[in-house]
Image: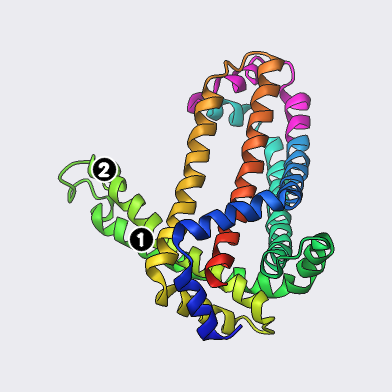
Amino acid sequence: MTNSNTATEAHSVSVIGALKRGFSAASGHLWISLVFWGVSLLLALLAALPFRSLLLGEAGNSLMVKDLMKGFDYTFLNDFIQSYGSGFTPVLSQSVLLLGAQYLLLIFLVGGLVKVLWEQSQPEYRSTFWSGAGRYFWRMLRLSVFFLLVHGLVLVVFGFLYFKVVKGFSPQALESEGVITSSLRWLVPLYVLVAAVPMMWQDYAKVFLVKNNNRFIWSPIGEGGSFVIRHFVKTYPLYLLNMILVLVLFMVNYFLVSLFDISSLGTIIGTFLLSQLFVFARYAMKIVNQGSIVALIG
């Protein structure tokens, strides 16, 4: 497809139309959502088992463990770490390694996801998914590292801005200590709006990488950025809309979990199942987002 055809397709598809196509893609590829969810659940269980062993081995008979079910409490957490913190170091090390493994696995799966969405393969999409995951893994990894640096730069800029706003946290320079927290009320939303741009840029670059099967990442980065800028009146609202839908998922999940009085095995299982349903829905929304981008690019 030529650039002119791509531009024509972008003009012909509305934001809502692209979003509808994204939902259609997610409903048609629930198996991919299950794969993402299964990988996350497996690694989460692998991370939880050492922590469970630590609790049973060092604090199994302590009443402090029961306090875990009452929610976050800084005093409890501080006392718990002081009493049993010696065993946390190896557990945390394992957790970091598992988080790294999850990060790599998700990058691996994204290549297959974008390949399936772009080719719109239905009968053999499972083989297309796995072949695409393997083919694009290293290029997707390099792309992710590049955009990690971009996100890091954005974070540094906002960190410097926050440092200037609170005047270096100097009590003498601040008119009120409330500025330290009140400034976050506008700075955090502003950061989200700005950070959405490189996040969006990255997702468009993924599609162009698969679309053109580029050997190096610089061409899809340039094409993705160019497309985002030329069609900003559609790409940015579409991306924000996807972010808002994910935020709604978070809010609904938080509200439903808060209804449970976590005091028994039944409620623990109930909240666990609810949280896993949310995780699955979150990955389905990932397909919605990427599918809507594919629809807009055409």
Please, is residue 219 above or below residue 236 in the view? below
Q: Is residue 3 above or below residue 297?
A: below
The residue tagged 1 is 158
Q: Place residue 204 in its image quadrant.
A: bottom right
Is 14 part of what is drawn in magenta? Answer: no
| Residue 155, placed above or below residue 254 | below
Circle 2: residue type: Ser
Image quadrant occupied by the C terminus: bottom right
Q: Main secondary structure of the magenta part?
A: helix
Q: Which residue is mark 2?
A: 182
Residue 204 shown left or right of residue 66 in the figure: left
* Total marks placed: 2
Would residue 223 appear left or right of 159 to someone viewing this image? Answer: right
* Amino acid carrying mark 1 in the image: Phe
Question: Which of 71/254 is in front?
Answer: 254
Q: Which residues are magenta?
A: 51-75
Instruction: Tell which circle, 2 or 1, labels the residue nearer the N-terminal end.
Output: 1
Residue 68 part of the magenta-drawn span: yes
Across and down, in percent, residue 95 comes to 70, 46
Q: Residue at x 60, y 60 (%)?
A: 291
Judge by depth and name the residue closer to the eye, 43 or 67: 43
Say which quadrant the N terminus sits in: bottom right
Q: Is residue 243 at least partly visible in the picture?
A: yes
Crowding near the residue tagged with mark 1, few <14, some 14–19, many ≥20 C-alpha atoms within 10 Å:
some
The answer to whether 123 appears left or right of 69 in the picture is right
